[in-house]
Amino acid sequence: MRRSRIVLLVGIAWLVLGILNASRLRILLPQYEPGFGWREAWIWGLPDALLWAVLSAVPIFLARRRPLGRQALPWLLHAVAAILVVFLHGLLDYSVSRLMGNFVGVGVWDGTMTRVRESYYVNLLVYSLVVGITQYLVSAEELRSERMKRDELDAELSKARLQALRMQIRPHFVMNALNTVAGLVEVDPDAARSNLRRLGDLMRASALAKDASEVTLDRELAFTRDYLEIEQARFGDRLRCHVTREEGTGECLVPSLILQPLVENAVVHGVSPKPEGGTVEVRCRRDGDRLRIEVVDDGVGLPETDATKRGAGTGTGSGSSTGIGIENVRRRVVAHYGSDHQFELRPRSASTATNGKMGEPGTYVFLSIPYRITVDPQSGSDVNSDTTSSSESSIAPRGGV
């Protein structure tokens, strides 16, 4: 707190106390001293408060520089300062009284000591109160400052963790994409070159968004579609993909690179081991103040041991993960939303399947996060949303390996 502000607040506080004291005298004393009016009340009640407005500088300064604690030296300094303040108060009080016509013929020392004897216990109490209030305010300010610093550090730590998790996804994704391209080099060189260019576009888009913890759903789905096109170059007719979102949800904010690991998990661990391949479906829709994201595949499903570990997860997610991608997603949604999310990874047989039937193999991933959008305050339009108006898309299969 600035020194000028402290001086102003102290002055106002003592002025208010002086006015209250003068008002108290004006109400109480007339019944004992007829003729006691407001003039006398101001003369008796206000000067003492104004004197303490000046003398408060001593206990405030010492309380800030040498706060009372376990060490003996601050206590000794405050004891000496309190005695000096009491004496100065008596001297100033005597001087004011002389100006108002009192203590006529009384010397300075005798008049000062008279005032000291009359009010030393009150002045010592006032000194102690000023020190106590000052130390309380200083401690509160320090505590508030420490909390702000801790909050800033926590925010920086969370940001660093999210950045580390996003960086963890990139090499994992690139490794799998390069393996896909490597499988096409001898079989279909043109497709390999095309997918290398597509991979380059993906990495460029990823680099541009490296500092963005959130992107719009439209942008995230576009990234996911590009990834699926790379995978379809590898799997051909064995991989069928459907990406749908509810109309009007494209401007919703989602963590960047949150869908790609879920889709990759469905392709690599679900469809790839299945000889005839399968279908991966991504569905996004609004449910009140929530955004529901579902990734469903009809692949080989979760292993028996893993399926028993993965029930419905709420808040922090559940179970272990199928590879680095799922675990990364689970940690990132916890870092982003705390307990305000739902994340589930379970067999498709426990959920509504792509074709509405139950009891079929496959895996079901469900993510529910708060529905939030970014709006330009001037235009009222979304500042991040793409202009895509289609709510459903299917990625046509290509010939592959």
Image (tube, rainbow, N blue to C red):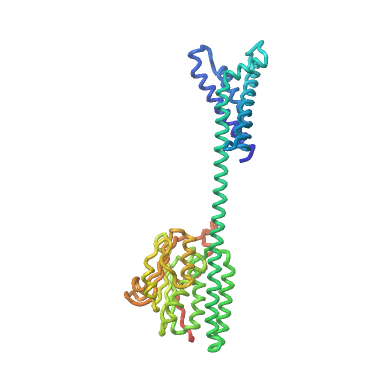
User: In which image quadrant can residue 164 be found?
Assistant: bottom right
Q: Residue at x 57, y 71 (%)?
A: 205
Quadrant containing the N terminus is top right
Asked whether residue 47 is in view, the answer is yes
Q: Where is residue 143 in the image (x, y as percent from the top left)?
A: 55, 44
Q: Is residue 247 left or right of residue 161?
A: left
User: In which image quadrant can residue 52 be found?
Assistant: top right
Asked whether residue 5 is in view, the answer is no
Q: Where is residue 107 in the image (x, y as percent from the top left)?
A: 67, 13
Q: Residue at x 47, y 68 (%)?
A: 327
Q: How many numbered discs sit on the rendered protein? A: 0
Q: Which residue is drawn at 49% across and 80% down?
A: 231
Q: Is residue 204 left or right of residue 273?
A: right
Closest to the observer, 48 or 288: 48
Q: Where is residue 247 in the image (x, y as percent from the top left)?
A: 43, 67
Closest to the observer, 269 or 228: 269
Kindly give the residue lying farthest to the left in the view shown.
358
Residue 400 drawn above or below residue 290: below
Closest to the observer, 369 or 242: 369
Q: Which residue is drawn at 43% across and 83% down?
A: 238
User: In which image quadrant can residue 42 be found?
Assistant: top right
Residue 255 drawn above or below residue 104: below
Kindly give the residue lying farthest to the bottom in the view shown.
187
Residue 56 drawn above or below residue 155: above
Q: Where is residue 380 in the image (x, y as percent from the top left)?
A: 51, 58
